[in-house]
Amino acid sequence: MKIAVIGTRGFPGIQGGVEVHSENLYTRMKDVTLRIYRRKPYINERSNKAYPGISYIDLPSTRVKGLEALLHTLISVMHIILHRVDVVHIHNIGPGLFTPVLKLFGFKVVVTYHSPNYEHKKWGWFARNLLRFGEYLSLNFADKIIFVNRAQMQKFKDKFYTKSLYIANGITPQERSEKSDYIDSIGLTKGEYILSVGRLTPEKGFEYLVEAVNKIDFVKHLVIAGAGDHGDAYLRQLKDLDINNKVTFTGFTFGENLRQRYSHARLYVLSSVNEGFPLVLLEAMNYKLPIIASNIPATDIPQMSADNYFQTQNSDSLAEAIKRKLSDSQLICEYELGEYDW
């Protein structure tokens, strides 16, 4: 079977939850031929790793917000029509706009619904409505729809039940790192910093986390690990909010450096306003960290109790949750992650 994959920036070595999802998914698939369509502006020196049965098609795109995914998906669809496959796997409802075109040319189409992107604050009126239209076309024309979030699937259960599947994201088990050379080099002390990981985009709600930390005198360090997508305006906003110089912005990291960051954190915070299924939450659980998360549908999982949540977009609620968690003597938390297996 030949499968084409569109709607992702690509992998390996490219930042993003969908990109991590894709790398873990496709590198485990056997007895198929996979063609991954990648966006040239994101290809870097770490993107050259080869996998059996996987080929990369690197096509032009842009980093202009609102045009990036649309332009790249259009070019990819044209290439797929000329170089046929058996199945096209589309990630996200934005690229799902092209589902009817692919069906018109006789392709089987699977769409993975990661998140309702039109809820993200970064989009204007036109983009939000275009994404809603993409959702409509994806749901109505795809042969199968994969939801990574059970709550999201329930919203469409009655109409699309027969072709919908819930498949949770997974986690690759990692042991805590005993090394500390990296965190030492950036001025951190074991067990004395709060960690949050994610792309620097408004839907991640980092501004509420920065505000909350600056309201708590005894919190000395917050580490935000991630890079921006389209310029550094959001990063500048976060730095302006860091009035007490408590925040360390480390950029996109991976490998041993990321392991050390997770391994030696005192607390992990997910402050997102919108998420599909936050892989970083599973990563924090894998490292057995105490966790605080915004009370959004994507974080409503059995491994979390009421004590793990704060009111979304409320820095006062988040500050109180941080105080509560840090007053707890429990440093190692056990989570049942058997369901989340790639």
Image (cartoon, helix red, strand yellow):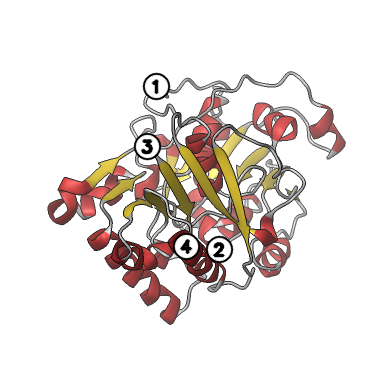
Side (left or right) of 33 relative to 257: left
Q: Nearer the viewer, residue 75 or 233?
A: 75
Please give the residue where the numbered disc 2 appears in the rendered image.
202
Q: Nearer the viewer, mark 2 or mark 1?
A: 1
Of mark 4 and mark 3, the one earlier in the sequence is 4
- According to the image, label 1 marks what residue? 338
Q: Which residue is mark 3?
A: 168
Residue depicted at x 44% and y 56%: 274
Q: Position of residue 23 (x, y in %)?
A: 55, 39
The picture quadrant where one finds residue 95 is bottom left
Residue tagged 4: 82
10 Å neighbourhood of mark 4: few (<14), some, or many (≥20)? few
> Which label lies toward us, 4 or 2?
4
Distance (Cα) linking label 1 and label 4? 42 Å
Numbered circle sitting on residue 5: none
Q: Mark 4 vs mark 2: which is more N-terminal?
A: 4
Quarter of the image with the N terminus in it: top left
Q: State how far apart marks 4 and 3 are (Cα).
A: 33 Å
Secondary structure under badge 4? helix
